[in-house]
Amino acid sequence: MTKGYLMNSLIEKMQSPDQDFRFMGLNDLMTEIRQDQSCFLGDEAVETKVLNQVLALVEDKISEVKNQAVKCLGQLIKIIRQPQMETVVDKLIDYSGGQDEELRDISGLALKTITAELPPDGKVAATACGKLTPKLLGQIQNPRTPPEALVETLSILSILISRFPVLLASAELDPEPLTVLAPLLSHARPVVRKRAIITLSQYVPISQPELFNDLLRTNVFPSLDASANIEKQRTTVHLVAAVARHSPLQIAPVLSQIVPGILKAVQREDDELREGSLQALEAILLRCPAEATPYLDAIVQTGNQFIKYDPNYAGDDEDEEMEVDDEEDEDEADLDDEYSDDEDTSYKIRRSATKLLAAIIGTRPELLTSLYKSVSPVLITRFGDRESTVRLEVWATYVTLLNQTAVYGGLQIKEDAAAIGGKRKRDTETMDIEEGPYSLLKSQVPSLSKALLNQLKSAKTPPATLQAGFSLLHSLLVVLPGSLSTQVPLIFSTSKTILSQPPTTSTSTLHLTCLSFLALFISTHSPPTFSASLASLTPVLLKSLGERHPRIASESFRVFSALLNALKPVKGAEWADPVYEQAVSKLSSHDTDAEVRACAEDSIADLWICATESVRGKGGKEWESICRQSGKTNGAVKVVTKVAREVSVGDVWVNGCVDWLLNLLKKSGRQGKPEMFVALDVLLKGYTSGIPPALAPVLVSQVKPYISISDIALLSQSLTILALLLTLAPITTFPVVEKDLLSDIYDISHSPHLSTPALDALLSFYSALVQADNQISTHVVPNLVISIEKAPRAEASPSNVAKCIAQIVQSQLAVAAGTIAEFYKHIKKSSKAKPSLVVLSLLIVGELGRFIDMSVQKGVFSSAIDHFASEQEEVRNIAIGNLQQFLPAIVQLVESDPKKRLLSLHALKEVVTHCSHGQLEGVADLLWVPLFENSENSEETTRNVAAACIGKLATTHPSRYLPQLHARIREPNAATRATVVSAIRYTFADTSQSYDELLAPLLVDFLSLMLDEDLTVRRLALSSLNSAARTKPHLIREHLPTLLPSLYKETIINPELIRTVQMGPWTHKVDDGLEARKTAYETMYTLLDTCLTKLELHEFLGRVIPGLSDDSDEVKVISHMLLFRLAQVAPAAVSQRLDEATPELQKTMKGASVTKDTVKQDLERSAELQRSALRAIVALSKIGTGVSPRFDAFAEELRRGPTWGADYKELLAAH
């Protein structure tokens, strides 16, 4: 069928007098366009004819046909030509401005559909914005346009600016939007004014500053005057709130002229004005935090004043919850339920005041202490607000306060600080925290818990209220564990009432919240506080174990697990047997939910550990269900491990579990194998009568497949099991290992891929092997050498083999002399050994020298030194068996031989790294001066090695060496300053606090080198700050106000450090400041983890946002990581900067522009950067929608798009 014939047949259908045919004609047209857009394109005359017919059907008498025509236009607008698009827009605007109400509505809907369906990329959107916007503005200017059409037109303009801000910003709009929209602020119809406020605020960011200033002068400032018209003031405060939300950068500079007027307006006797004023203050607080700071006290007072605003209710705010007994409380609650006033809108003011206080709490962590003094008591008095929506808002606000306390409360900081010094310091800190957030909260818990529980105890309390109340109690216990010990009877009775009711669709979430709270309550309170009331609660908890709802059953098992651990050891408890029976019942059933099964398994483990005598005589039938061969077994393996570690069940049980695990190991795939090896390790140690003789050969054969470098983690665990077997059952294990495994382990030993845990396990294996058989060491050492000699060079690590041989010698010292003699002959000058054997011999002699005094071997040292002159870089190890004899000679080489200096410094580093503090104290003076003198005027590699040695030496005698380092920070030589600050970084590797008191007063001076004139010194100082933040944050927290400006300065791109380099026909820009900038951003990330409470988040975010547009992809990735972390720890603060972050995130997600010079690596790098940005976007999308419509639209576009939709949903599910 040709395109023309198809289109003509559809036109014929659409012209049919039968409404069903007209509807189907439109439907078929949409279907054809979706399947193949080209079916519509081709003959312009036919296209126009179809389009006109669709437009004609917009005026159809049948509403279904009209709606279908609107949907069809939404599809057509994406593909039609520009003249046709103008025709559609003109026609619809004519309709929308007409007098026919029905046609006006449907045309407005059509225009909305068109603007919502426009593809974000391509010329169509740009053309549509350029053509449609002026016509819409012209319609607003038309005095004959009815109010309903104005509202629709304003909505369409809002959609356009939300979806295409960049296109509208670059378009030359005539007339200017602000000029057209401003007169609508005085329109007679409130609905028009309300819609105009929103649209106008959205267009402020793309308008000329002069126009916005005119708006402020003519509409805002005069209307905030105390004598201004009430109606105008209402409009103005709503406008201020909207502009603050959408255009904070524009309104921030003039807030000093706006906020005082709003604070006066809120006191006027008009409820709508009060509500609007409170909302405006909330928006200003959230969007312009720095500029709002001077007015915080006044805003807090206003919030506290109007959260109590209830002129139609005569109750005493302060005492209604505090001085009445329980019976009176219930009567009052009943009266509240009966009280009703449909005209009463004061609850809106209280709700807005609550949200205002929540905004302060969520964004001002530095005010926590004062908020607990001024706001927290007021919130507690409003826990019983008679309007349920306000009551829930008050509780949610208090949860925000508790969450802020958990993150910023500072209890951990005080503990860190107290650890710096002795008793005097701790006493001081204790006095400091008496007025801190935690102590103030603790003092308010009695009134808080009583006020809240009085709202929950009534039988008429709705499920939503109960759930919110238990969520608040849960948050309280997370922040202040054990704080509800005085309210146990009321908590348990309320919980019993809830759990006694069978869960329904609407109440199952409440049951889960209640059970989760009880588990936390039991685990955070001592048994004496709740044991008296426990008997009343356990029957309903036992009933919950049998619920069909899987999550309720799971949570019930968790409550009993918490109870078992709290009451350990449990003896004679009536509920223990029913819990056991329920757990066995769930485990033996094949249709049990996976989560319920896991919780039942955990309960069995806790019963064995905490109520051992109760379950020991049950016959062990539970293990038949736990140790199953099919289905998921990860939880069962962990349960077996847990029980074996804590309880001696018996060798028969251990045997059964080992057999079960060996069968599981035979299964293909890696999943769960690491946990199985851990379980085997614990079980083998649990044999009371020794390992059965028949087990070792079977277990060795099962372990053999994992003796491979294909999976290093499993290799490490396999070697650990073998070492354990050799230790516990050497007679039966050794022959099998020697026969079946030793040759494979030789090949593993020289692998360069061994990680530190795997190498440690390998060394443990060799130690156990030679102790199991005294003769084997003389065979193992030469076999290891033969194995590495046969291996390809890329697969050989002589240092690993040297460590293995040293471990063998250390475990069998009888072979030491022969081993030294064997390898010493290869490093003599006269030796004709090949270089690889020389390297291996030097490494072996060096490793042996760590624990054997080689001073009696006169030629070893001199032979090793001779190899410093070798042409091969690998030949450079040295024995360190006698510090007094060998160390002076190495120091002399450092001082006198420039060619051997770097290698000698490496030798010194080996000495310093591997010697104990006691040994180093005796030689520190010998090393200190030469290290400094030879780091000056040296290349960076030499300087770094020297700095590592100096840092280590400084920790041996800090009172002596730290002042000497401090004295050198003002040295004129930049290399010396670089060595000093780098050495300080190495001192942080020692995480003990033994010298913190000495370091604390000097640290800021060391870190002040971030302002040094030398770029390398600045970079190293930043790196030192990063290390300090990671390992000793308590030393820098109080100094951050001094240090952060220097840190933030290094995140700014310095054009003076960017140079152009010619590379053949191309020029390439090199940024010498990039490394320092990367280090600065990495330091910011570390500070976010360790010093969050001391960061001013508005200023911090002010440096994160520019990082999103940095020239370096690495800086962008770190900025994405920062946003991801901020979304978790400071959602309120970061949500207010989403408008600024969105454009750069959009740019990143578009990907790299493909040109003729683009290579595969560019595309891969761009894709990785996009994935990094996507992780941040998904995290940000979860902190609340509605704050930034632009970001919400962008995130939704990604979620629905074909390119990133699947990845987006996967990340969303994972978080």
Image: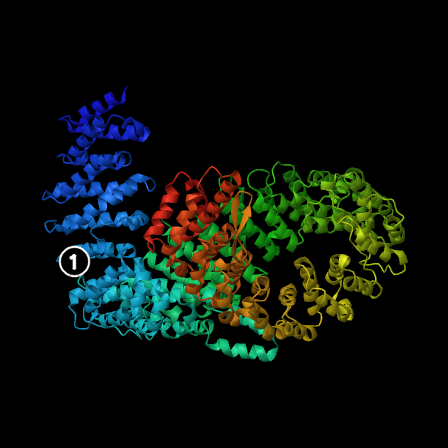
Drawn side of residue 418 relative to residue 236, left or right: right
**Residue at the disc numbered 1:** 183
How many numbered markers are drawn?
Answer: 1
In the image, residue 785 sits, relative to residue 986, either above or below, namely: above
Residue 338 seen from this side: no
The colour scheme is rainbow
- Badge 1: how crowded within 10 Å, few (<14), some, or many (20+)? some
Q: Residue 592, percent across and down?
A: 49, 42
Front one among 208 and 403: 208
**Quadrant of the rendering where the N terminus is positioned:** top left
Q: Position of residue 16 (x, y in %)?
A: 15, 25
Where 33 falls versus 218 (above or below)? above
- Across and down, in percent, residue 360 comes to 36, 67
| Residue 953 rendering spot, x and y as whole percentages | 71, 67
- Viewed as shown, does residue 160 lie left or right of 367? left
Residue 299's quadrant in the figure?
Answer: bottom left
Outermost residue toward the top? 1
Residue drawn at (39%, 65%), measured in percent from left and top? 363
Which residue sits at x=69%, y=48%?
A: 758
The amino acid beneath tag 1 is Pro
On screen, residue 79 versus residue 721, left or right, reads left
Which SS class for mark 1?
helix
Q: Is residue 875 left or right of residue 157?
A: right
Viewer-nearest residue: 723 or 144: 144
Asked if residue 9 shows in the view, the reply is yes
The residue lying toward the viewer, choosing from 891 and 721, is 891
Q: In this rendering, is residue 1206 above or below 544?
A: above
